[in-house]
Amino acid sequence: MNRTMTVMTMAAVMSMLALVPMAATDAASYSLTLDAGEGECDVSLFSGNNTVTLPVASLDGKAFLGWYDDNGALKGRAGEKYQLAKDETLHAYYTDYIVKVSITQREDGSYVFTPSFTFKGKALDNQIVSSNWKVDGKLAGMGDRLEWTFAKSGGYTVTYLAKSLTYGEAYASVDVKVPEKDDSEETSDSNDLIWQVSGIVAMVGVAYLLWRVLK
């Protein structure tokens, strides 16, 4: 009896397994080829089906703008994530329209980011028709400067994209390390305030006693 039940149970299990679709043993794998053109890039090939971080390419005297597909469409910039979903080749694009971003930190802890432009080594005025600033990929502002206060300490990436009718696009990315706030300074400021208030109270008390004596 037990043997019969065992055989029947195994047959039932096999029948149920037959109804379950077989999972693919190997996930699809794709190749992403990076063509740096006349420039250089540390990575030239990605394989798999995961998300990768696009590298930067470099070419002397020019600025790297981004990675473009065969149709000339921008697919991503250095440091951005890119999903491998098919076999394809991306091409590095460089420009003579170069932007550099200077960073100034104010006494209150805020930052000011200011761009400067050159074209083939010659300094330019800000001949832009549109521009935007991003902090860690999120739009932070528009215009020819960014004033920004970071909510907490840590590392941030600030990017700037400018478009000119004459020179095309200029793109820059800068990393900012925001230090931890010095609590001792806050404590010192608080103590100074307490002493100032205490001094005022003491002066008022002395003045009141003198008034009572002279009255």
Image (spheres, rainbow, N blue to C red):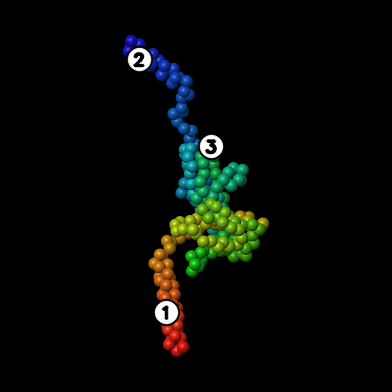
Count of marks, rendered view: 3
Residue at far left of view? 2
Q: Which mark is residue 68?
A: none
Q: Residue at x 53, y 38 (%)?
A: 85
Q: CA distance from mark 1 to mark 3?
A: 78 Å
**Relative depth, front residue between 5 and 14:** 5
Proximity of marks 1 and 2: CB atoms separated by less than 8 Å? no
Q: Residue at x 38, y 16 (%)?
A: 9
Residue 57 shows up from this direction: no
- Relative to residue 202, is residue 124 drawn left or right? right
Bin the neighbour count of mark 1 within 10 Å (Cα to Cα): few under 14, some 14-19, many 20 and up.
few
Residue 14 in picture, x, y percent from top left: 41, 18
Marks 1, 3: nearer the viewer = 1
Residue 121 in picture, x, y percent from top left: 57, 63
The residue singled out by tag 3 in the image is: 86
**Relative depth, front residue between 66 and 37:** 66
* Residue type beneath disc 1: Ala
- Relative to residue 124, is residue 7 drawn left or right? left
Quarter assignment of residue 70: top right
Q: Residue at x 48, y 40 (%)?
A: 50
| Vertical comparison of 29 with 125: above or below | above
Quick one: label 3 or label 2, which is nearer the N terminus? 2
Residue 137 shows up from this direction: yes
| Vertical comparison of 190 with 83: above or below | below
**Relative depth, front residue between 122 and 190:** 190
The residue singled out by tag 1 in the image is: 202
Quick one: label 1 or label 3, which is nearer the N terminus? 3
For numbered disc 3, what is the local secondary structure?
loop
Proximity of marks 1 and 3: CB atoms separated by less than 8 Å? no
The residue singled out by tag 2 in the image is: 6
Quarter of the image where the N terminus is located:
top left
